[in-house]
Amino acid sequence: QRLLEFDDDREGMVPPLLTSKDIRFEEAVQLEAEGAFQEAADIYRELLTEDWEDSDVHYNLGNCLSEQLRYRESLRHYREAILYDSLF
């Protein structure tokens, strides 16, 4: 799973304000870490309705689906993650 990364090494830097999308993403990551894969997947799907090209959301949704043994669906989202971010 991928988390939002913030550069907090610079002295005096103020971390960016979190958007409601960021908060929902972090909520889904937490649910995923707790093993609540279906609940996390539901949030990731909700986030994709706002931004289909978000590779992090596709990747994490793929992980949730894989944990639920839904491999065909997970592969689709892994492919979408690669499509929108070739570094995946």
Image (cartoon, rainbow, N blue to C red):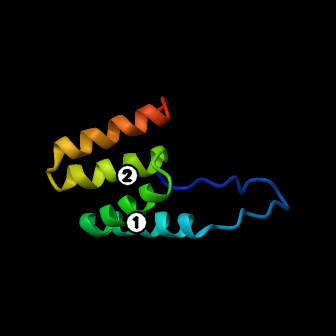
Q: Nearer the viewer, residue 75 or 88?
A: 75
- The mark total stands at 2
Judging by the rendered image, the residue that carries numbered circle 1 is 28
- Residue at the (79%, 64%) spot, across then down: 14
Considering only vertical position in the picture, is 23 above or below 9?
below
81 lies left or right of 22 = left
62 lies left or right of 47 = left
Mark 1 vs mark 2: which is more N-terminal?
1
Q: Are marks 1 and 2 in contact (CB under 8 Å)?
A: yes
Outermost residue on the front side: it is 49
6 lies left or right of 44 = right
Q: Quadrant of residue 37?
A: bottom left
Amino acid type for the residue under numbered disc 1: Ala
Give the crowd class for mark 2: few <14, some 14-19, many >=20 residues within 10 Å. many
Secondary structure of residue under mark 1: helix
- Residue at the (53%, 69%) spot, across then down: 23
Q: Quadrant of residue 79?
A: top left
Residue 42 position within the rendered picture, expressed as x and y whole percent measured from the top left: 32, 65
Q: CA gap, disc 1 to disc 2?
A: 9 Å
Considering only vertical position in the picture, is 71 above or below 37?
above
Residue 58 position within the rendered picture, expressed as x and y whole percent measured from the top left: 39, 47
Q: Is residue 88 visible?
A: no
Q: Quadrant of the C terminus?
A: top left
- Residue at the (81%, 60%) spot, across then down: 13
Outermost residue on the right side: it is 12
Give the crowd class for mark 1: few <14, some 14-19, many >=20 residues within 10 Å. many
